[in-house]
Image (cartoon, rainbow, N blue to C red):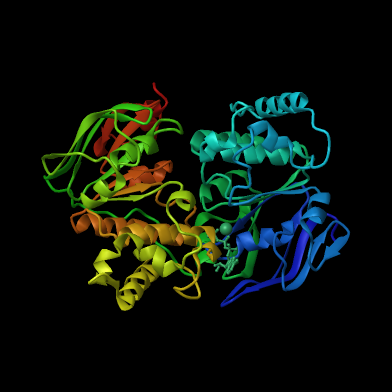
Amino acid sequence: MNTDIVLSVENLTKYYPGVVALDHVSFGIKRGEVHALLGENGAGKSTLIKAVAGAIEPDEGLIHIGNDSYGKISPKESREHNIEVIFQEFNLVPTLTVAENILLGDKRGKLVDFKQMRRIAKELLSSLGIKIDPDRLVRELTPAQQELVEISKAIAKDVKILIMDEPTAPLTMHETELLFKIIERLKKDGVTIIYISHRMEEIFKICDRVTVMRDGKYIQTLDIAKTDREELIQLMVGRKLETDYPVRDCVKDETVLEVENLSGNGVSDISFSLKKGEILGVAGLVGSGRTEIIRVLYGAEPADGGSVKINGEAVHIKRVTDAIRLGFGLIPEDRKAQGLFLNMDIKWNIVFNNIRAISKHGVVSEKKEKETADTYCKKLRIKTPSLSQKAVNLSGGNQQKVVLAKTLAQNARIVIFDEPTRGIDVGAKQEIYLLMNEMVEAGKSIIMISSDMEELLGMSDRIVVLSEGKQAGTVEKENFSQEYILNLASGE
Ligand SMILES: Nc1ncnc2c1ncn2[C@@H]1O[C@H](COP(=O)(O)OP(=O)(O)OP(=O)(O)O)[C@@H](O)[C@H]1O
Ligand SMILES: [Mg+2]
């Protein structure tokens, strides 16, 4: 055996009803490397690492760690090999503090010195450059902060192999940089890292090798230095792909929405207008209030002041149902918590906000339900054996596509996308951009919050920049530049 290899899988296979999630996958991870796992939504990445962590039981194949081999490994055995996993779904206890979450893990039945625990957590967080108070309850943290706590929790143990499933999905640029510094440091300490991400530029920045998976199968492992974006995309999707932002010219001289001095939810005095056929980008760092003010506009949080006009008429949006009635649709940032009924099937999730349109005399037409769901499943290429699959059984990215489908099926006139392509693979990203274009070309208007600067610049007609709960500026397309927007966002 190659002693450079610290972890390998051999013919690893996992079946779910109607799906081969892992199909005889074999490859190895070298000691001390940062190894990327790449593949479209539903390719089997999360399933693979769940098998290694002992969270699921493979049906065939072996997992080799050091000199030990397992047909199935228990979570305890996996941890005994100093493997730590940061899963795509959060695993923190919301009602405990940051410090407790970081350090309580293996203290069950043991005496706990809370004072010492707080001190250790504080030291760890500050040594990692993470500015979070160890005494805060996890449920009060933003998804980005929770992710940073997850990472600290893994590092607090004597981790030798750290597996991260889309760690940067909830992070913005600033925190992503912080994570990369942490990864560099871990690498220096000899930690091996397996890194899953849909953001290609990250893979090129921090990884040494990359393994591509497609439809549950192992495709190829390459040295990062010897490949490029185009080759990787082609291996992932199995076809050639346009990756440019589609051009359009459809902004009408007709204002559909005017927001003036809107305040609430910690944000104050935000003003902007939106034209028919326009995509308005919203930029800002975490904590700038992007999501917060949009939730006020959508009636999910109370407004403290300001006015909203639709087609020139003043409207009062007190609750979400008002917003929906007025033609708003929102694709939320925290899709699992706010967007999905995990235990209901895909069909039901997609038509949920649209029940009226597919009902007659109060009875839901099953045929229409199926047709609508089917249309969007195909459009967004949602990977599932059937429309009756429960949402909980879909891969992370495919769950996000269901939330997108749900809002799209709602047929809103003003559609708000909060991080539209987060966690979504390159192929589907392109589909979503095309769909957004279709929408504005058909006379709808879009507000798009995004942390992906490239996407923001590529898709928006104008960009509103927020900074620390206030409006820092509005940038017209001819003045678009990453530097200018970042400067505004950081309050310069
Ligand atoms: N518990 C389950 N029951 C049924 N099918 C499942 C279950 N878990 C995963 N699958 C299916 O297995 C396949 C692989 O899913 P997996 O979560 O590994 O994908 P992934 O590569 O992590 O995708 P993403 O990028 O979207 O996170 C998908 O088709 C998914 O629907
Ligand atoms: Mg996944």
- Given residues 351 and 32, the one toward you in this image is 351
Q: Is residue 482 visible?
A: yes
Q: Residue at x 23, y 34 (%)?
A: 272
> Which quadrant is the C terminus positioned in?
top left
Numbered label tally: 0
Whole-percent x and y of residue 92?
A: 63, 43
Q: Residue at x 24, y 47 (%)?
A: 322
Q: Residue furthest top?
A: 492
Q: Residue at x 21, y 57 (%)?
A: 441
Whole-percent x and y of residue 428?
A: 43, 61
- Given residues 391 and 180, the one toward you in this image is 391
Where 488 falls versus 246 (above or below)?
Answer: above
Res 221 quadrant in image = bottom right
Q: Residue furthest right?
A: 67
Q: Is residue 50 left or right of residue 343?
A: right
> Which quadrant is the N terminus positioned in?
bottom right
Q: Is residue 123 left or right of residue 92?
A: right
Whole-percent x and y of residue 319?
A: 29, 43
Res 132 quadrant in image = top right
Res 370 quadrant in image = bottom left
Q: Is residue 141 visible?
A: no
- Given residues 387 and 40, the one toward you in this image is 387
